[in-house]
Image: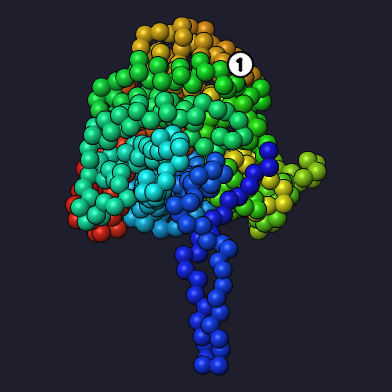
Amino acid sequence: MKRKKIIIIAFTTLMVGSITESCNKLTLKPYSVEPVGNFYQTSDQIAAGIAPAYTALQNIPDGNVNQMNEITTDEIIVPTRGNDWYDGGQWQGLWLHSFKPDVFVDGGWADLNNGIGKVNFTLNILNSLPSKPSNIASINAELKVLRAYFIFQFMDMFGNIPLVTDYNTDPSKVTQKTRAEVYAFLESDLTTNVPLLSTTVDKTTYGRVTQYAGYMLLAKLYLNAQVYTGTPQWAKAIAAVNQVINSNKYALNGNYFDNFSLADRSSTESILAVPFDNVNIGGNNWEMQTLHYQSQLSFGLSGQPWNGFCSTADVLNKFTGADVRKNQFLVGQQYAADKVTPLKDTQTGLPLIFDPNITTLSSATDAFRLAGARNIKYTPQAGTSGNQSNDMVIFRLADAYLMLAEASLQNGDAATALTAVNKIRARAGATTWIPTDLTMASLLDERSRELMWEGWRRNDLIRFQVATGTHYFTGARTPAKGDDGDTHTFLFPIPSPELNSNKNLKQNPGY
């Protein structure tokens, strides 16, 4: 499927006046003006009209939100190599859980509020039309469920948040709602609107919120209910995720990596993905963030990557046997594109050997420039220097099966849990489990192996910690991180710029 980028240019006023007394006034007929009341009438116009609400999604799978949700966990570390990647200590702060209410944290807050604001603006325009589209109810539902995704992430990361659902809200009067209040709003909004969404799964709904994306979000809400409200909702999570699985609209890809390749938009597993395109839709910079400078020669890139994000040996050791998912990581000697010529770090002359055994968070040694396993889950694209054309995943069927496994295990149905998780392991070429293999700890590790670097790890670790008491999120890990001492780090601090601009906001405890 060839993807198109839709650009809407609205000229609200066209004036051509006299420049001097000797010039005549020119009267032009504006061909590029479409009164808003005449718009939103055809399916193409509707798709174009709501497109701006979706653009905010481009910042989520590869941006502040993903970084805050992954670098705070065991999955991604950003070592300080000499002076590289120090940046005021922000990357170390994420790993060490020494969060500060600074500009970096404000980026995640702003990205999520940007999404909420764009949806509210679009809803305001649509519902102010003198002649509304015949399917206005389903359009409203689509936008509200999209907004619910942003609100869900916002609540998950910051706790008590401003809940703004009307574009005309006076910013000076915005106050915070408790997590329980936001949870109740999301449950009501999703259960009302998800049934109104499209059940079509084809190129016309690719990259858009369908009924099944809505049920995935509802399942995520219920799966985390114990964190948000203190009361688990395992049965509700099972019911919601089974709406996706039992629809039979999706199937696990035979090849795990097809979910992340340049051909990923034909994935049978993708429930909601964010489209990217090297020419038209930038923002997927996975290859640049993780690869070493000389990895440019391994993949035929047009520019040098940034030698940043990586993973430790503890992450790699989660993979055993013939599990193909371990191939998302590069370790050991690296080669040129011919797969024969060994590469060197040209600055130090050392062989380009990626070493996942990271025992310190910062070092100026030459060898430390090569520290960490590099992730190529989203296949690097030859001829690019970032802005890859791989579409990035938000929801996919494998996660649905793993959510079913977790909720079923917690709900006392180990048989269903085992069947679900073994579908994932069989696809990966890993040994299928017997009943004694299935525990909360092993299931958490399986979620890591399957969903590595996809933005769910912080959410998972906190949920499993709340359910079991094990310090999965707050505990010590190598290198350098000690136990947090309490659970205030379950939430990020409210950014200082937001507190300064709205005196109604109160800082989260512990900051």
Q: Residues within 10 Å of mark 1 (few under 14, many from 20)?
A: some
Residue 480 can be seen, yes or no: no
- Kindly tell me whether residue 26 is visible in this rendering: yes
Element assignment for label 1: helix
Nearest the eye: 90 or 34: 34
Please state the horizontal and vertical placement of residue 30, each as a whole percent of the image.
Answer: 55, 66
Q: Is residue 96 left or right of residue 318?
A: left
Residue 375 position by quadrant: top right
Q: Would residue 365 appear left or right of 383 to someone viewing this image?
A: left
Q: Nearer the viewer, residue 360 or 325?
A: 325
Which colour assignment does the render follow? rainbow
Occupied quadrant, residue 468? top left
Q: Is residue 312 found left or right of 115 in the rendered image? A: right
Q: Residue at x 28, y 49 (%)?
A: 494
For the point 25% across and 22% down, the residue is 231
Give the residue drawn at x 46%, y 17%.
Answer: 242
Reading the image, the residue beneath label 1 is 426
Residue 93 vs residue 381: left or right? Answer: left
Measured as percent of width and height from the top left, residue 137 is found at 40, 35
| Amino acid at dot 1 | Ala
Q: Is residue 72 above or below residue 245?
A: below
| Most foreground residue, 407 or 299 | 407
Instruction: Give the number of marks.
Output: 1
Task: Tell me what residue is drawn at x 29 percent, y 20 percent.
Answer: 232
User: Is residue 331 placed above or below 246 in the rendered structure?
Assistant: below
* Pick the front one: 38 or 58: 38
- Quadrant in which the N terminus appears: top right
